[in-house]
Image (cartoon, rainbow, N blue to C red):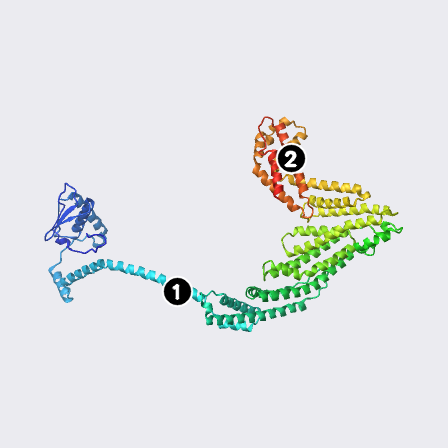
Amino acid sequence: MSDKGKQLTMLHSWLFKEIKLIDGINPRKSIPELEITTDKTYRWEICNVNEKESFIRQMWKVCHRHLASHKPEFVNISIPVEEMECRISQESESFAGTTSNLDNKEEFHTISPLEENDFKNLLSKYNMSIADAQNGKFIFQTNMQAIVGSERQIAELLNQLDLLLSDSIKIEETLDTYDRLLATCLDLSNADFSVLSACNLSDPKKILECTRAAMNLQKCIDAVVSPGMEQMVAYQEQMQLFTQLQDKFSEHFVAHLTGVFRAVVNEAKSFQDELTMPKHDVTYGLLKPFSELILWLKTSVPRGYFIILKRYADVRREVNRTEMGKFVSDLQVRMSKIFCSQSNTPSSVQSTDLLKMLKSYSSVSSTFHETFPIFSISAKEKQEMNEVITLAFSRIEEEIAIEEKFCSCFDPNDLIRSLLSKIYSSVDELFQSFLDYFESKNPLLTVYLLSALTDRALSNENGSYAASVTGKIIVHLKRRFDSFMLFAQEIELAYENRERRSDVDRWYPNFVNSLWDGIEVAATDPNGKSPASIVRMENYHVLHSILSQLKIACLVSMRKETKEKYFAAMNAYVKEIMGKPFEKLQIFFDNVSRFIDQGMKAEDISYQQAFNRQELRRIVGFYPLSEVRRGIEQLYDTTEQHLSDEKHLLQVIWRNVQNEFIRQYKKYEHLINTCYPNSNIQMEFSLDDLLSCLSEIARQH
């Protein structure tokens, strides 16, 4: 055998019948050598003894199975000859058993002379000589040698294929590079050039074609070229052509949209139903297909984009002024129907007129009730007013929300809010007039309207423009509500030392009672988002501040009662929120206190299964210092969200919260020492830790 990697060649070959002797050399000693004798003796060395014995067995089997005569002689073999003969006989019997159905156990007979003569005639007839067999044998051997010899050529062929594969990968990378280079040298197709030149925007299909062509044009203009190509004359001429085409198309597009906007004004329909806003589905349907093209214009020709926004805002502002004016007029008519019973009273004039009339009326002998009837409204009127206001502002907000959603298709950023503010710029003016009318019916109605709109604004904290419109109206209402203080001051000056001062004093309590009623209505509104205690606390605080500044003698008791209502609302709110940071702890000790109040001895509490020492340790373990800090921070954030920015009550409430925390902590310590003596159970945070957390959180905010 040659070394690994070298070519194998066949040196000798013999037929089995040519072998005369197979010699194992030494049957008593296992050696991997044997001798084979044909015309001469050859000595062979095999890898190991087992392979030598296996080889000899196979030689034995083949010779005894296929050679009737001229069998080789086996000598010096360690395997008993009887064992081989037994195996050969068993295999022969097995082979005979499987072939018994074929030959029916017929005995072998030699051919007769006649058969031999026929066989020779057959060979001579077809020229089948022994030489042909010898030649075929030689050809077969040569073929096998060629196959074995071609192994090296196959390996070389595979190596060549690997090289070709590597070269093909390099070629593909080169082609990809060429593709990228070609992508930076885009050219506008003739079809796109024709579409942009014609600028046919008559139907959605044509609009889509123009949009696609404009995008392709933008790709050509924005293509990144290799350094130095910008200096080429051909490149400059091509870019000039593209720029001219872009400018021409954008001008036609802006002119077309301007015509569409003008058609919107003519499309605006008159509507007869009260408190309804007309739908603009047709307008939106006409403009929606241009959304992608408008975004292209924003990127490519910003000047044309801002021209479109301005013209759209001008057209929509004109349409909105007409529609919103009709809507507010209908709202005034509806309010007139609700308060028709008060339409001809002196309260129908403006509050500023009332201030001017005070001195003139104070000098005559008429009573205050004759001059200024009580500004109270019935429960039915309150309900009807709330229903009308809710319906009106829901439709206004719906209209604004639809417009905002439509505009966001063209530019979903902060520029939309600027556009909407231009479109609805007339809303502020129209509702100023409406509030003047509203106040002319009854100055006290401002309180109810402020309450209704405040709750609505709190329920719509979604950052929409519609919510901001409602917020602006609320600001105007609050300014008008603040005029009550000026109104009361003018009354005091007008009726100071007058004979009819008693009429004013009788009127004041009724007015304050009406304010109280308005605050309670706002607090108990089922649709309100703020807690009822917060609504009461903030409004009673404002009312108490006004009454304290006015210093009206007849309202001293009502001022004190207002203050009591304010503190009651604050304490109620503090109790509502105090359970949140230490809910499990509070529930546990509240139940302990309830059992003691019912007559159970304090020392017997620890024997109750629900209040034993193990349960107390478990509850106390829920509140380490870190958990306490996190709970207090959440409590502060919640309180800050509940309060409005104008009341500045956060520090006052937080001081009460601190006092309540201290009171509760001392209560819990007292119950632990009383009900669980000698238990060594204590809170996982001290009172100093609690005070430090409260102060630190207040400073951070």
Mark 2: which amino acid? Ile
Quadrant location of the C terminus? top right
657 and 13: which is toward the camera: 657
Left or right, 216 with respect to 15, comes to: right
241 and 72: which is toward the camera: 241
- Residue 447 marker: none
Residue tagged 1: 175
Secondary element under disc 1, as helix, strand or loop, is helix
Q: Is residue 225 above or below residue 65?
A: below
Where residue 118 appears, x then y in whole percent?
13, 63
Where residue 32 appears, x then y in whole percent?
17, 45
Q: Is residue 575 visible?
A: no
Q: Quadrant of residue 337?
A: bottom right
Where residue 11 appears, x then y in whole percent?
16, 55
Q: Is residue 76 above or below residue 438?
A: above
Residue tagged 2: 662
Where residue 442 appears, x then y in whole percent?
79, 53
Mark 1, Cα crowd under 10 Å, few <14 / some 14-19 / many 20+, is: few
Q: Quadrant of residue 611?
A: top right
Number of numbered discs overlaid on the protein picture: 2
Secondary element under disc 2, as helix, strand or loop, is helix
